[in-house]
Image (cartoon, coloured by chain):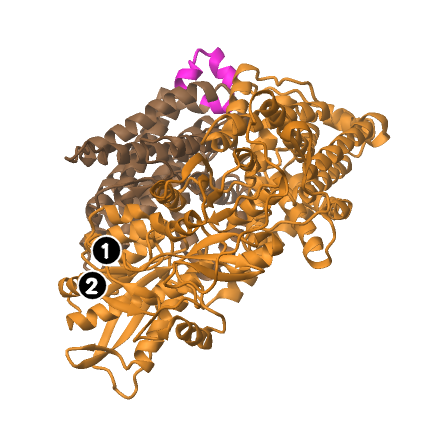
Chain colours: A orange, B brown
Amino acid sequence: MRPIITLAIAAVTLLVLTGCGEAGEGTSSPDNSSATDPAGRFAGTVRIGAALSETGQYAVEGRDSRQGYDTWVKWVNEDYGGIEIDGRRYAAEIIYYDDESDADTAANLVQKLIDEDRVDFLLGPYSSGLTTGASAIAEANNVIMVEGNGTSDTMFERGFRNLFLVATVASDYTKSGIELLAGQGARTAVIAYQDTSFPASVAKGAIRHLEDHGIEVLAVETYPKDIQDVSAIMTKFRDLDPDILVGGGHYNDAVLFVNSAKELGFAPQGMLITVGPSNPKLVEELGEDVNGVLGPTQWEPEMAYQGPYFGTASDYAAYYESLWGEPPVYQAASAAAAALALHLAIEAADSTDTEKVREALYALRADTFYGPVSFDDRGVNTAKAMGTVQVQEGRIRVVAPQAAAASEFSLPAPATLDPNSNFRGSKQLAQALINGIALGGMYTILVLGFSIIWGVMGVINFAHGEFVMIGAYLAWLANAFWGVDPFVSAPLVFVVMLGLGYATQRLVVNPVLDRSHLVSLLVMFGVAITLQNIMKLVFSADFRRTDTALTGAWELTGGITVPVTRFWILIVALAVAATLTLLLMRTRLGKSIRAAAQNREAARIVGIDVSQVYAVTFAICIGITGLAGALISPVLAIQPFQGPPLTLKAFAITAMAGLGSVRGALGGAMALGIVEAGLAIYIPRIGTNLAVVASFVFLVTALVLRPQGIFGGLRPVDATAS
Amino acid sequence: MSRGAATGSLDGTEAKRRHLRRAGWAVSWAAVVLLAGLPLLPSVTNATLFTLTLMLTSVGVAVNWNLTGGFTGYVDFGHAVWFGIGAYTTAILMSLQSNGPQIGWSPIPAIGLGALVAGLLAAVIGRATMRLKGPYFSIAMLGTFVAMREIVRVTSITGGGVGLTLPPYLNRPLFYYIQLGLVVALVAFTWWLRRTRFGAGLVAIREDEIGAEMRGIDTTRFKVGIFSFAGLSTGLFGGLWAYQNTFVDPDIAFVEVRTIDAVMGAMLGGLGTVAGPVVGAGALFWLREILWTNLLDYHLVAQGVLLIVIVLFMPRGLVGLVDRRGISITALWGRGRGRKTIPDQQEDEP
């Protein structure tokens, strides 16, 4: 009973503490940022509404956008003297709500801004997904929305008359970059993109721009959201030896691309990555590896743009920095530019009437710090070209378009490996097998702890992936702050996780041991959600990685390569599997564990302290799981939500291979690794997407065909027995 | 799973139960009348109706989830797949294009067919996955959900990762009344179902599937039947949602959170009861608003903790709480303090 009470107290304390900490910062009441007007300088107020993300996935970009809008409010009210309508000055006021990065909420809030706050105009939320829903509501209610941070082309193909975008649309993101590379003599290209709305629009446009410049597209690959490993795609690309790689989706994908290219020795002449290179964080995170990488940018302070409002781009940057204490990222500039465009249109129309302002927006021709602004009949600003930056010796420099460039393009260092362009048949098969076995080694170490816990105590540890994630973060801490190699810190991580495992078992697992599978499953699911979000609060959702000395690739005959890091992970996995087998089969503890697994009551009767045995087993398994996390930290991206796919893989392998069977875990992990690697290499275009679902198809088929599992284990699998 | 309070299997006095039942009816009718009259109030804006519509969606999906998860004990971790399929079918039909003229379907047949497709797919997939028991079924459904999202992503008719847009027709009061009517009908259906042989068969499957089979219940037909109905009904909500949201893409149509909300709503309210998922999902919806407002980033942590607390301490949910207190008070009056009137219902060993 005691652990339950402890847990309850902990839960209540947490709730109360967080409640107290945050009370009064509620976001449901509108948050007005209008300047007070004691002197009566203004004849009235222009009310503008915006839903922006303060929490959730887009919290950072949402804050940047809001600071951009607020920069304009501050400037228009205090420096400019108010919006001039019919000879009188009006104050600008923006009403904000937090859309929680959720499409339903954003739509709901826009409805609320229109109905309840009766705003005159709307400014856009952050991201294409949120803007698509929000703009439909603005359209249906005939309220103008000007925005700078939702750029997917589909939004502007709906014939809306109330949506205006100051930024460049997604399909033109790579235009100036591809022009630049074509001018350098590039002939061939490959494309890889995350198959979600925005990156897909960018890629579609990139294919068109490449074709316009006569560049041959050798391969197109897509991959799903939340991918942790792009090495299969990079292997394929390396073998095609293209001049250009166009790729990416969101910031985190950039980390994956640069990492994986380095790991495999893939270095095309031009690496154009959709989102990331313009962000100083990427340079900070990846250091030298990111040198030479190109990326599109909507705006940079060093661009040669200027206008009568805010002055030059760098003037705007200075003004922004004086307000917020940090330099503006392009999202902030786009937001301010959207507000400025609306402001100019209101003044040109001399009215806040929707019809008149719309006409003024269509007629607007302005030069601004953000570049020229002029909307076409879709509502897209086609006057401003997308910029391209290149990371040069750790600095982000604008290299295209000509009108805004501040530096020359520099050719990156040549490839370290000599890629073999004739890479087919048996060599490809050998490479797929090697990749598969390497992946299988990772899965082995990842699955062992899960399998033993399920086999011994019948608990499906739904927070398994979260323990991997915590192990990986521990290794990252050691690596980032003291430069410890993850292969060195792994044993330490094992020890720390041993303790965490013991505590978790005593606190939440033990109380539910006597209840059904589903109860423990749901409890561990609760633990998973809790851990994910605690880690997100502590470390943010940015992808991290660790550096190890055991990196690179060994080249065998004919261009076949062995990834070094994965090879060593495989070795450690085999060693751990062997040790675990010895422990289970040859020691007294192992005997007690097996006895407790076979028959809890009988074990109790012969004098085994079952609950202690369970706690120790759980601790060892979590220790191994944490160790696995540390080992994979240089290979898979570390982030708070990396756990669930790993848990599902562990489940698939265990259910197929036998509960609590070390041999089964090894066999199942290898089988899945080889199938996934084969799919990724042999299926063009969507291979990586398919590899993600392979484990489920595998699992469901295996369970339906052979419900008792393939290998034996500590506990019989019987998926059809209740 | 714990037996629900409304199954009538509890050892309470007849008068007490009649009293509770009458109170339940009164509360239900009051709630329906209140919700139906709400849009007539001048202070209620479209934005409020939109919020309530979202809540009704959440309640509807939880009620559907409870049909399999609560009644038959098949805990479905991928229920949101039917929502996504309903949404996508609707979106595909409504945005159909030929060269030139728009040949998109009008919304009512599109949403209807969306529900039907979801129901049919549920029948096919349910026949395979419902052979599996306990956690195996749960995870197989989670797998189905994830796989379906990837399939939608790589198919061209769905618009791939870019998704599809629908014409914006946003009549909030209309959608509100449609969904209110649906939820009321669904709850009435559940209430009626509990009183039929079919409903009793479902509960028998939960309690002892082999036993039920031996008594001549065609368990496959029963459980796959209710699973398909739940799929169809959730598909209907999905279609309505797509129409209101005006666009779909794989990552907003197939969201894990919809399943999590349904599971948590049903558990919070009381698994396998008629009122449970309604009370639970409704409470969860408002609780979330409050948590979000006051805890911001911590609210997801709080939600995880809440799940642990519900499972550990409130296996019967809110409805069970009311019922148990009622009964124990009666016991106090009639038979003296301390007597245990309800045997602690332990979870059955796997």
In the rendered image, the vertical position of residue A133 relative to residue B242, given as above or below: below
Relative image position of residue A75 (x, y in whole percent): 34, 77
Relative image position of residue A516 (x, y in whole percent): 59, 31
Asked whether the viewer can see residue B349, the reply is no
Q: Nearest the camera: A416 or A10?
A: A416
How far apart marks 1 and 2 lie (CA) works out to 9 Å
Residue type, numbered disc 1: Gly
Chain under numbered label 2: A
Q: Which residue is mark 2?
A: A361
In the rendered structure, the answer to whether residue B214 lies left or right of residue A615 reads: left
Q: Residue A147 sits in which quadrant?
A: bottom left
Q: Nearest the camera: A581 or A521?
A: A581
Q: Nearest the camera: A399 or A371?
A: A399
Please tell me how crowded label 1 is: few (under 14), some (14-19), or many (20+) other residues with Cα within 10 Å: many
In the rendered structure, the answer to whether residue A600 lies left or right of residue A635 reads: right
Residue extent of the magenta highlight: B204-223
Question: Where, quadrant-wise, is the N terminus of chain A in this rendering?
Answer: top right
Relative image position of residue A690 (x, y in whole percent): 48, 29
Q: Is residue B48 magenta?
A: no
